[in-house]
Image (cartoon, rainbow, N blue to C red):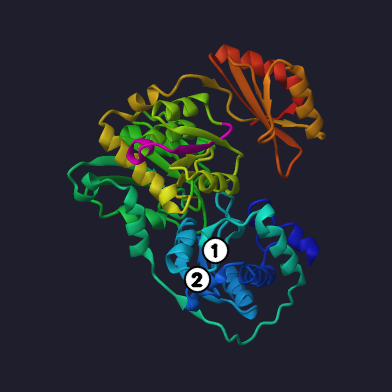
Amino acid sequence: MPIMLSKVFKAYDVRATVPDPLNESVAYRIGCGTAEFLLAQPGLDQLAEHRRRTIVVGHDMRLTSPALVAALQAGMRACGADVLDVGLVDTPFVPFAVNHEGCIGGVQTTASHNPANYNGFKISRMHGKPVGEQTGLQDIRSLAERAVENPGDSATDVETIDLWEAYRSHVFEMLGTKLQTGEATIKVAVDASNGMAGTMVPQLFDDVPGIEIVKINFENSSGTFVHEPNPLVEANLQQVRDATTEQGCALGICFDGDADRCMVVDEQGGIVGCDLVTGWLGQRFLRASGGGSVVFDLRSSRSTSELVREAGGDPLRSRVGHVFMKQAMAEHDAVFGGELSGHFYFRENFNADSGAMAFASVCTAMVEDGRPLSEIIAGARRYRQSGEINFQVEDKAAAMERLAAAYPNAEIDRLDGVTVDLGDWWCNVRPSNTEPLLRLNLEAATDADVEARVADIEPLLGTRVAH
């Protein structure tokens, strides 16, 4: 059993192909381990007595999800936890439900943007805080490895609850009154990627008077994807780009499989980098709150920090990954945050990410501004970026040291991998958690500068991996 579990536990969640190595037996044991871990948290006495043993469980549209959920819940109940089943929901719905109902934690059954033969679990603890490798996932794995499958009657409860109306009210804190009443209107192309946005968007936004939605790939009951449900891959944005221009939309949004991430395209079909979206929306949140901090991952364009400062805010670089972003949001009481991957974080959402709130915020910000999105973002396009380039190398640490040593006059920091800043250009190199890869992001003033600097650095990092 330990060998099987080692294949499904990742840095931030549980994820693997089904049925090998992830199956119902494994799900049962993970349910046991999760329940034992969450029931042992400090501070449960702060919760209402009837929720001190309750775990929220939701799932995505994958055909393997119902069976895995049943096994997961059986394991939780066998280990003394009650279950609050919120049904078919997007991933951000689960931490919302944990907070709304005051439960000890939650689990979303999903494999996010992975292909249809994958599934997994995203686990959160009290207050919806994420459980990652350094915050309990290793403990859950150890507990799961010791669990013994013992199906049978349980004295604990499973309660099914519909929280969509409460979730809608929560998300609509980010949706402007003019759109809610129809005083202002916007037409948006939305690609649900055959994922959970195909459920979430109709539940929340179909009857909003001010939003007209051109729907793409909303069918999500077959367990198949027209394109990979990963909006970070440029090819996966082609449908929404085409629909935006052909249907005369003000913008386009493409969600990933579990609808916690999204990418934005402008009215001309141009892709808008999430770091630029972070700077743009960050200015809006700073104005509304009278200042504060905006968190962004350290791969973001230098223009992001400039936009934040120009709005009177404090720009804060973070390590890449939702666990680190949420931690930085909480530590600094940040008003907003964003990652290049399409995660956007909101103080009003318990410092967590929300694809639905990002959608509402972008639509609202556009209506308030009144200009085309391409014009709004043009002022943020101040530098040229390489995009993420992967290099294969066995000794990742040695390669990063070679990079740092090659630029002795640079400002160096090691917040996440190695960042080298020469003033007129900078780069960050991060190691992959799971592969012998280094990931390079570089920014300079011109495309020619970017190409030249990448060419200089390439021999230091290993073998460049083709897309």
**Could you tell me how far apart the alpha carbons at marks 1 and 2 are, in whole angstroms?**
9 Å
Is the N terminus in the top left, top right, bottom left or bottom right quadrant? bottom right
Q: Amino acid at mark 2?
A: Leu
- Is 217 positioned to the left or the right of 429 in the image? left
Outermost residue on the left side: it is 183
* Residue 156 is covered by the magenta coloring: no
Count of marks overlaid on the render:
2
Is the C terminus in the top left, top right, bottom left or bottom right quadrant? top right
Residue occupied by mark 2:
47
Residue 8 appears in the figure: yes
Give the image location of residue 43, x and y in percent: 57, 67
Which residues fall within the magenta stretch? 286-299
**Residue at the spot x=52%, y=25% of the render?**
302
- If you read the primary sequence from the N terminus, does the residue marked by circle 1 or circle 2 appear first? 2
* Residue 297 is covered by the magenta coloring: yes
Give the image location of residue 320, x and y in percent: 60, 40
- Disc 2 crowd rating (10 Å Cα; few below 14, some 14-19, many 20+) is some
Numbered disc 2: secondary structure: loop
Q: Amino acid at mark 1?
A: Met
* Viewer-closest of 193 and 351: 351
- Is 1 positioned to the left or the right of 425 in the image? right
Residue 55 appears in the figure: no
* Viewer-closest of 144 and 406: 406
Residue occupied by mark 1:
126
Give the image location of residue 387, x and y in percent: 58, 28
- Quarter of the figure with residue 310: top left
